[in-house]
């Protein structure tokens, strides 16, 4: 069930009405309704993988209980390692097993060795990378003593499967989200209004902007030989905005939907394309994933060394970004994407001149035109690796761009629909300190003008809605 579908609209209205009909005094029944709704939401995609979601939830719940109850450090470690082995094992089996077998078979076939492996093609369970990381962080935090294990199974199952953020995040920590299921939620009309506004803005970003940019991007990336250097470079920039509008649009819908039920989720984006360096970009882009890898990969890695050196930090950074790239998918292009960003981040941290200045600290002090050129040059190359189907295809596109092959016009690639992107960018720049442009709109413009704006957005959404146009991050 897609957020940008009519089915989800009906589903949301029914669940919302039943939820508040039960009332805040029946918190357990409300949680039970959310759990049933979340399992229905997930099961309608493919009911066979619902069992995997439940199994992961139960295993990590039991692991948390065992870690919390045990007095033995070895027993705690055993349960922690069991949880890690299960989560990473499931992730590897469904997401990466086929990749490694394929590469292994290709390697030996190229060496002339006869192979008889049967490639196991399986459908990757929706949201696997997201809910796996969410439950994994729970058991690690319990083991580290950062949180107490929950004793309530219902609340933990809700924490793992909460439908607004189940399939594509934000990746929430138990310390933040779990207590919200334990506490009473009181109906707040203003909160519901804000939720609906944020959903509306998210749908606009996804349907009117991201999906339209996607048509042009697909034309260029699927037939790069038909386009010149400037067109391909422009398509790479458009893809950066497509991913941003698609994924941040999803996040807006997720956060807005959670607000309707009295919950708060983290904002995953802070206008990342206003960043003046790649270091700051990663502090504003997919924030919950970046923080997850920082807390559970980078920091433990560098702390494992007795002496912290610059080379240790660089190795930790490269390793972390490689894993960030590979988290996105089992493809060499994602590894290249992660490695490329890791190298850029490492370079930005290298001191120069007085040994106190780095690119990361110097770039924000330079004129905006300089940082814009630097930033979009880096992110455009990065987006080519992210979007291309293979390293060869990515290299072909990059080579055509940098050799200025067939320097042709771009007018037919996107045309006037680019104005929607311009309008969105201007709206987010003007409201840079808000969570989203329509936040607290009643404080800025009168009611008639607000409703005109709402209807304009709704008409545009209906006009440009594409059937079954899934969100990009659903594949991860």
Image: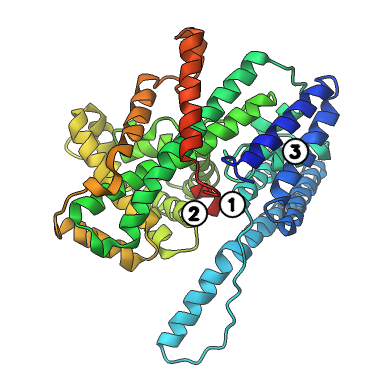
Does the image show residue 168? Answer: yes
The circle drawn on residue 129 is 1
* Comes first in the chain, label 1 or label 3: 1
Q: Nearer the viewer, residue 387 or 285?
A: 387
Residue drawn at (75%, 48%) of the image: 57
Contact flag, marks 1 and 3 (Cβ < 8 Å): no
* 10 Å crowding of disc 2: few (<14), some (14-19), many (20+): some
Does label 3 or label 2 sit earlier along the sequence? 3
Q: Nearer the viewer, residue 69 or 159?
A: 159
Mark 3 sits on what residue?
Answer: 158
Residue 328 numbered tag: 2
- Residue at 46% across / 12% down in the picture? 449
Q: Quadrant of residue 2?
A: top right
Asked whether 22 or 100 is in front, the reply is 22
Q: Position of residue 154 (x, y in %)?
A: 82, 38
Q: Position of residue 447 (x, y in %)?
A: 51, 9
How many callouts does the rendering have?
3
Residue 400 lies, in percent from the top left, at 20, 61
Q: Say the numbered circle drawn on residue 32.
A: none
Badge 2 or badge 1: first in the primary sequence: 1
**Mark 1, residues whose alpha carbon is within 10 Å: few (<14), some, or many (≥20)?**
many
């Amino acid at each position: 069930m897609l957020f940008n579908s009519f089915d989800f609209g009906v589903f949301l209205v029914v669940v919302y009405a039943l939820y508040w009909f039960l009332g805040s005094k029946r918190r357990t029944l409300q949680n039970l309704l959310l759990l049933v709704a979340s399992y229905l939401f997930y099961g309608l995609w493919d009911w066979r993988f619902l069992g995997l979601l439940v199994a992961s939830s139960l295993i990590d719940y039991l692991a948390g209980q065992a870690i919390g109850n045990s007095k033995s450090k070895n027993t705690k470690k055993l349960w922690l390692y069991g949880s890690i082995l299960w989560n990473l094992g499931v992730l590897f089996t469904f997401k990466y097993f086929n990749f490694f077998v394929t590469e292994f078979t290709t390697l030996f076939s190229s060496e002339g060795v006869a192979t008889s492996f049967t490639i196991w093609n399986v459908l990757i369970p929706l949201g696997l990378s997201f809910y796996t990381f969410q439950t994994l962080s729970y058991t690690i935090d319990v083991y580290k003593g950062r949180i107490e294990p929950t004793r309530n199974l219902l609340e933990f199952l809700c924490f793992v499967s909460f439908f607004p953020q189940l399939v594509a995040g934000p990746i929430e920590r138990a310390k933040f989200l779990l207590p919200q299921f334990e506490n009473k939620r009181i109906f707040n009309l203003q909160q519901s209004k804000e939720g609906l506004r944020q959903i509306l803005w998210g749908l606009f970003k996804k349907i009117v902007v991201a999906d339209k940019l996607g048509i042009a991007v697909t034309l260029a990336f699927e037939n790069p030989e038909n386009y010149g250097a400037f067109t391909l470079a422009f398509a790479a920039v458009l893809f950066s905005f497509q991913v941003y509008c698609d994924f941040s649009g999803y996040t807006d819908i997720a956060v807005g939907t959670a607000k309707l039920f009295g919950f708060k989720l983290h904002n995953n984006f802070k206008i990342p394309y206003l960043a003046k360096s790649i270091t700051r970009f990663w502090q504003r882009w997919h924030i919950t994933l970046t923080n997850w890898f920082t807390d559970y990969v980078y920091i433990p890695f560098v702390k494992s060394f007795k002496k912290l050196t610059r080379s240790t930090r660089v190795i930790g950074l490269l390793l972390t970004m490689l894993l960030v790239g590979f988290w996105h998918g089992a493809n060499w292009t994602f590894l290249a994407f992660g490695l490329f960003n890791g190298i850029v981040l490492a370079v930005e941290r290298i001191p120069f001149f007085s040994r106190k200045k780095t690119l990361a600290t110097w770039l924000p002090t330079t004129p905006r035109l300089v940082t814009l050129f630097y930033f979009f040059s880096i992110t455009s190359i990065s987006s080519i690796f992210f979007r291309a189907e293979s390293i060869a295809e990515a290299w072909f596109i990059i080579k055509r761009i940098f050799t200025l092959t067939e320097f042709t016009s771009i007018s037919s690639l996107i045309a006037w629909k680019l104005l929607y992107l311009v309008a969105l960018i201007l709206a987010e720049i003007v409201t840079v300190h808000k969570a989203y442009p329509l936040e607290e709109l009643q404080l800025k413009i009168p009611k008639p003008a607000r409703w005109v704006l709402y209807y304009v957005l709704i008409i545009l959404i209906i006009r440009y809605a594409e059937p079954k146009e899934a969100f990009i991050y659903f594949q991860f």
